[in-house]
Amino acid sequence: CIRFSPPGCVFNKRLAEESQEWILLPFVGKDIVPHLSFHTLLKVRGQLLEMIRRSKVNKNKVLRSATARIPAEDLLYDESEVPDTPERNAILQQLETLAAQAHPDNESNDSLETIRMYPPGRILHFARTEKFSHGFCCGILPDHEYHASWIEDRDEMDDISISPYMFLDHLPDFCADVIGRVREAQVGKIEDNQTEGASLGSVSHYDV
């Protein structure tokens, strides 16, 4: 069974590991969906609150930073330099409360908080490796080269990477294009190796 980019909250860890025998899970780049679970969303919520607490600027400048290269130190206070204000202290208190609620030993946790869920099957990641200086993919973003590799540690899926590609990478036609390009590149390498081997074999024959 091939599951293209399913949510990251399908099975518990034991069943997710056992399902490697019958499920293959390919996903592309920074696709957010295979990383989605109750716990990863809690983590993003905490990170977002922490960034708000440390923010130096208003939301308009934060939004502009999505398209302009603004150094992080111009947007955020260092942890040791965060101003002591009632609003920031209230956010800090909220973060501490959320962390205590999410702790495994908290008896008030419901099943969503106590049972960790994971993506199913054997996970094959098509990651970006190089960016071309020419051309555009889908008319939106620069073209890239991709490399396929197995994700051996399922806990690597426990983080959501905020990226301009996080939704684009989930589009079916985009995934199909990337997988097809990687396949063609691998087939080309195999054919080149076979041709080179045959050529070396013929030289060896004449040398003998």
Image (spheres, rainbow, N blue to C red):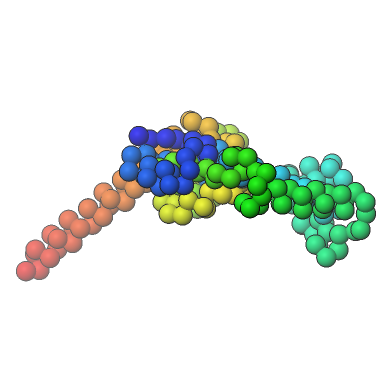
Q: Is residue 60 above or below residue 80?
A: above
Q: Quadrant of the N terminus?
A: top left
Q: Residue furthest bottom?
A: 208
Residue toward you, 15 or 150: 15
Q: Residue furthest front?
A: 107
The mark tally for this picture is 0
Is residue 98 visible in the rendered structure shown here? yes
Residue toward you, 202 or 80: 80
Q: Is residue 56 above or below residue 20?
A: below
Residue 46 horizontal side relative to residue 186, left or right: right
Q: Position of residue 133 (x, y in %)?
A: 56, 49
Identify the residue at image location x=87%, y=45%: 58
Q: Position of residue 130 (x, y in %)?
A: 51, 52
Identify the residue at image location x=86%, y=63%: 81
Q: Quadrant of the C terminus?
A: bottom left
Identify the residue at image location x=33%, y=39%: 22
Identify the residue at image location x=93%, y=54%: 85
Q: Position of residue 190 (x, y in %)?
A: 28, 50
Residue 158 horizontal side relative to residue 93, left or right: left
Is residue 163 visible in the rendered structure shown here? no
Q: Residue furthest right?
A: 85
Q: Position of residue 148 (x, y in %)?
A: 42, 49
Residue toward you, 38 or 162: 38
